[in-house]
Amino acid sequence: MNTLLSAQVSRFELRFESLFNPGRALAFPCDERGQVELEALSEPARSNYYYARALVGREFATPALVRGGYA
């Protein structure tokens, strides 16, 4: 990944807020469209990402695109 793309990806995060535990969330660096570069995540982070996606509506709210994370 080139440096410019890295800087762009790190300005946003995709946040999956817990439906049952206020303040608990899983967040992942992404681009301005909410696209997460899975190859750039560690194996545990990738597993957490798939877990959060699979449990949207059951454990986590629909993910929100947030500016300013991971900067």
Image: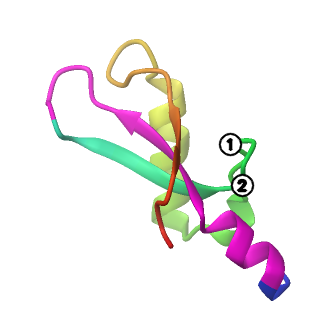
Farthest residue, direction right = 2
Q: Residue at x 81, y 73 (%)?
A: 5
Q: In this figure, which residue is indicated by the disc labeled 1?
A: 34
Q: Which of 51 and 23 is in front in this view?
A: 23
**Is the C-beta separation of discs 1 and 2 under 8 Å?**
yes
Q: Give the SS element for disc 1.
A: loop
Q: Residue at x 73, y 68 (%)?
A: 8
Where does the magenta region start and end?
Answer: 4-22
Q: For the residues marked 1 and 2, what is the alpha-carbon distance in whole angstroms?
A: 5 Å
Q: Give the SS element for disc 2.
A: loop
Q: Does the magenta stretch include residue 8?
A: yes
Q: Is residue 31 magenta?
A: no
Query: How many numbered circles are shown?
Result: 2
Residue 18 placed where, x, y %? Answer: 27, 29
Q: In this figure, which residue is indicated by the disc labeled 2?
A: 31
Q: How is the image coloured?
A: rainbow
